[in-house]
Image (spheres, grey):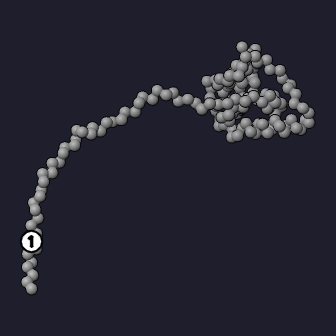
Amino acid sequence: MEETQNSRMTLPFNVSDQQIIDQADTSVTAIVEEPLSQTLIEEPQVEFTVFEEGSKRGKPLLVASDGYRYYAKKRGKNSVLWFCSSRSVTCKCYASVVQKGSDFVRGNNSHQHGPEPSLKDRVSVSVKVRKEAREQPFKSTIEIEISPS
Ligand SMILES: [Zn+2]
């Protein structure tokens, strides 16, 4: 048996002209320009709740859902000026809210302190507790003269 080691494989030179297609210009990497952000960053909607006897002394308290509380500083005919109840000698917080009817507008001054977590819940509870302690039906002690114009 003669093994012809003639395994010289004649590779067919099949070098097809692989034209390397210059794919440079077909896909222009479009720089995705960010659209000019015209959307104003809206503050998360803050809900305001008035607890007529929310304060420790049974005075009205305005509780904002972002964790700040206010006391009624001034009452006008159609409006109430609320000041941050954290205003004190140590904490000079001048944040305020103007209430007009059922609209609440925050003043320009921001709070000089952090919000209170779950403030609304705690105020509701303390209001309830005080109410129960008095063991008498709820009586509105203040007359709110807020009439939406
Ligand atoms: Zn404040």
Say whether residue 50 is left or right of residue 108.
right
In the picture, residue 12 is in which quadrant? bottom left
Q: Which residue is mark 1?
A: 8
* Residue 110 showing in the rendered view: yes
Amino acid found under the numbered disc labelled 1 = Arg
Q: How many marks?
A: 1
Q: Kindly tell me whether residue 99 is visible in this rendering.
A: no
- Is label 1 in a helix, a strand or a loop? loop
In the image, 137: left or right of 79? right
**Towards the viewer: 96 or 91:** 96
| Structural crowding at the residue carrying mark 1, measured as other residues with C-alpha within 10 Å and reported as few (<14), some (14–19) or many (≥20) | few
Residue 118 drawn at (x, y percent): 70, 40
Q: Which quadrant of the structure image shows residue 22?
A: top left
9 or 80, nearer to the observer: 9
Residue 129 at x, y percent in the picture? 84, 39
Return the x and y of residue 71 as percentages of the image width and height: 75, 27
